[in-house]
Amino acid sequence: MSRPTPAPRSDGIRRANLSVVLRLIHERGPRSRAELTRETGLNRSTVAHLIAALSARGLVAERDPTPQRRVGRPSPVVAASDDLVALAVNPEVDAIEVAAVSLAGRVRERSRVLCPEAPTVAEVVRVVDSVLREWRSGPLRAARLAAVGVAVPGLVQARTGTVRLAPHLGWHDADLASPLAAAIGVPVAVDNDATLGVLAERLFGAAAHDDDVIYLNGGASGIGGGIVLRGIHIRGADGYAGEWGQVSLGGPDSGVLEDEVSRARLLRIARLGPVDDHALAAALADASPALRAEVDRQRSLLAVALGNAVNVLNPSKVVLGGFLALLRERGADEFDALVRRRAMPAPAERVTLTSAALGADRLLIGAAEAAFAELLDDPLAM
Amino acid sequence: MSRPTPAPRSDGIRRANLSVVLRLIHERGPRSRAELTRETGLNRSTVAHLIAALSARGLVAERDPTPQRRVGRPSPVVAASDDLVALAVNPEVDAIEVAAVSLAGRVRERSRVLCPEAPTVAEVVRVVDSVLREWRSGPLRAARLAAVGVAVPGLVQARTGTVRLAPHLGWHDADLASPLAAAIGVPVAVDNDATLGVLAERLFGAAAHDDDVIYLNGGASGIGGGIVLRGIHIRGADGYAGEWGQVSLGGPDSGVLEDEVSRARLLRIARLGPVDDHALAAALADASPALRAEVDRQRSLLAVALGNAVNVLNPSKVVLGGFLALLRERGADEFDALVRRRAMPAPAERVTLTSAALGADRLLIGAAEAAFAELLDDPLAM
DNA sequence: ATGATATGTTGTGCGCAACAACAAATTTGC
DNA sequence: GCAAATTTGTTGTTGCGCACAACATATCAT
């Protein structure tokens, strides 16, 4: 359905400029007022007013200028607030991970609460609430909480904050945002974990500031991902976009990508139990012929899927995470060439393949980013 | 690469509002000033000013109000100008099609110039120039020319207006925009033909005002297409996005979609020569068992490709054009169900499949739309 | 004909960025 | 060391564009 055309108003432009300035500071790090005037093209006085407004709301803090060995009056450095935090939550099968991430991008606190079995929505709410209470009376006494972001391993309708289907958690059409927002008292953003991964990678990781990015992440439960085109995050009509794992390659009767390119298959052939990616990497480095053959098989299937994606979406960067990065790194140049050969020459020559750069913090940073999104869009709402 | 963050200025908001109003009139047809105030949310006086500015530049024309059988002062109807035209050009293997399309959306003139062999860039320029001269001294004497849009059957780098590869025309890395702009004296927009098809379908056709659209068009030369997500046209990093025909389905060693789902194959089995889609439809309606089997095979392969697209992009609408629409229409409900079965339940329940609604004018309207794009974005530039 | 309703028109006010002039802080040149 | 040059922050003014209110105009209902 088409949205009603939004007409810009004169009072919206201040909001937009505050958003631009705050985003610059948040995404590209602390910078001087002089740099901000250059980057935004706005007038010096305008930038001063905007920063004053952001500062009054505690969103940014000014520091003394760093000596720059340059002629002229030094410009004070303005940085995103480290006292304004978002809660990042990642419910998994066996644990709930909670973190407090500041607007400055620092993970200030983190806690992993083990669960004997897959947690319910109510348990997630309870754990988040209790962790938050503890932090509020301790390390985060002086901090303000802006919002909560949740990275869910499953299909999420981001607009409503409901989890459509999370097989590993046993959730089905579960409303997560409402009870969590009611308990904590701040807005709650919910999204798919891989989708949030690409957000983080694009901001601070392997696809920093690329505008056309495809991201595929391989985990124990399958292959998920995300898409950024023209610099905006593609959710699709309902927020389900990015399910690369369900792509079918072998014609009408065969399985889907995540059945064939699968971490479990590798572990089985390597005769390994449930190990982490580090141990898996070690096993792949010293592989038996059978395992090597399986790796090659999975590599060529993955290359076909990526080649298709390159043809259809013409991205400037393809980012692989989880065990997909491990597959690629068993001969990265060779793999990249394989992908390029599966694609048409024109889009192939443009695309760059890389492995994900962010480690364990990726999901937490992505979730915090989703939580901060509303504030960054409209800093006055805070 | 990431663009420098654009900061909105106060004088940019007038431009943006002019753009919003002109787009509304252009895309959704003539409407009263009263309707425009409602739809934009702007003030009555503001709308009056904006329309005065557009009218002064000859972009819109006001007509007497149509009787509405309603209380209150009647509101004059404002329509897009029919005197401002764009030239739409579509070079094919055996002909060059040229049309003059007004901002009001009417095809005012059209001409098909036959070519003994595939035209060169220079020939296209010459034909367009001579056709335009003829029209200018005749039917288009009073019209103003805004821009030229060219729909090319091949890979186009839209940003620069160069044709990367158009195998049927024999073009390779051909700069089309520069010589054409130099000859005609107005800006030239160049894009892939299927990409422009989705533009037209989204404006006036089967996907009218859908915000997440996938479009696949099947022609004699293969399968092309286009993508619209979040209401914006996805070109990819270089403008090559939408090459659905090059998607591989059968694993690492098999061919691509347009090798398998192919008009030529159908014609061969039906023992037909190079006929148009109408004749092909007739042949499919009265098919031999062998042809029927081939149709079913192609249908199921196409369904797999579409199912993948639905999973990855979560569109609200899938539009099929050319012989792909014919394939679907041999049992549309059954085909749609097939696609839905190949996709995950969540995105599948949202998506609607349809056949393209626009006929032969599709490419011309799309090309004109590309030509008008600059004007619609910034009406003051005219 | 008269009142109710809806819309165009005109003049005023307000918000916000641009601009200009001045003040402040640092480096460079002598 | 001190002055000039350079860059940036600060302050007050200007101009632009939309909102709003008051009034004028055109149609319908009774």
Image (tube, coloured by chain):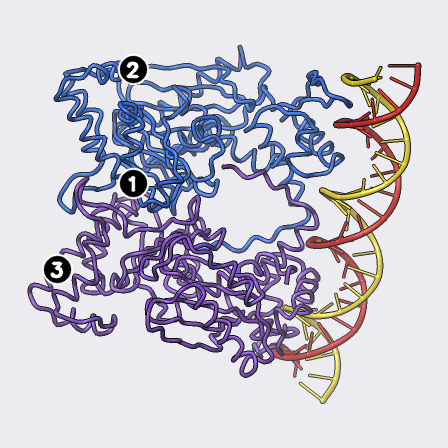
Chain colours: A purple, B blue, C red, D yellow
What kind of residue is marked 1?
A: Gly
Element type at mark 3: helix
Q: Residue A15 versus residue B2: which sits nearer the camera? A: A15
Q: Residues within 10 Å of mark 3 (few under 14, many from 20)?
A: some
Q: Chain of mark 3?
A: A
Relative to B33, is B331 on the left or the right?
Answer: left
Task: Read off the residue under disc 1.
Answer: B307
Q: Position of residue B326 (x, y in %)?
A: 29, 23
Residue A39 visible in the displayed image: no
On whether disc 1 and disc 2 are found on a single subunit, the reply is yes
Q: Are marks 2 and 3 in contact (CB under 8 Å)?
A: no
Cα–Cα span, label 2 and label 3: 49 Å
Reply above or below: A105 against B54.
Answer: below
Q: CA distance from mark 1 to mark 2?
A: 27 Å
Check the image and report above or below for A287 versus A380.
below
Camera-near label (3 vs 1) is 1
Q: Nearer the viewer, mark 1 or mark 2?
A: 1
Q: Chain of mark 1?
A: B
User: CB of mark 1 within 8 Å of CB of mark 2?
Assistant: no
Read off the residue under disc 3. A294
Chain containing mark 2:
B
Residue lying at 49% horizontally and 73% vertically, measured from the top left: A100
Q: Is residue B309 visible?
A: yes
Q: Amino acid at mark 3?
A: Glu
Q: Residues within 10 Å of mark 1 (few under 14, many from 20)?
A: many
**First in sequence: mark 1 vs mark 2:** 2
Crowd rating for badge 2 (residues with CA inside 10 Å; few <14, some 14–19, many 20+) = few
Quadrant in which the C terminus of chain A appears: bottom right
Residue B278 has which mark?
2
Q: Is residue B55 above or below residue A277?
A: above
Amino acid type indicated by mark 2 = His
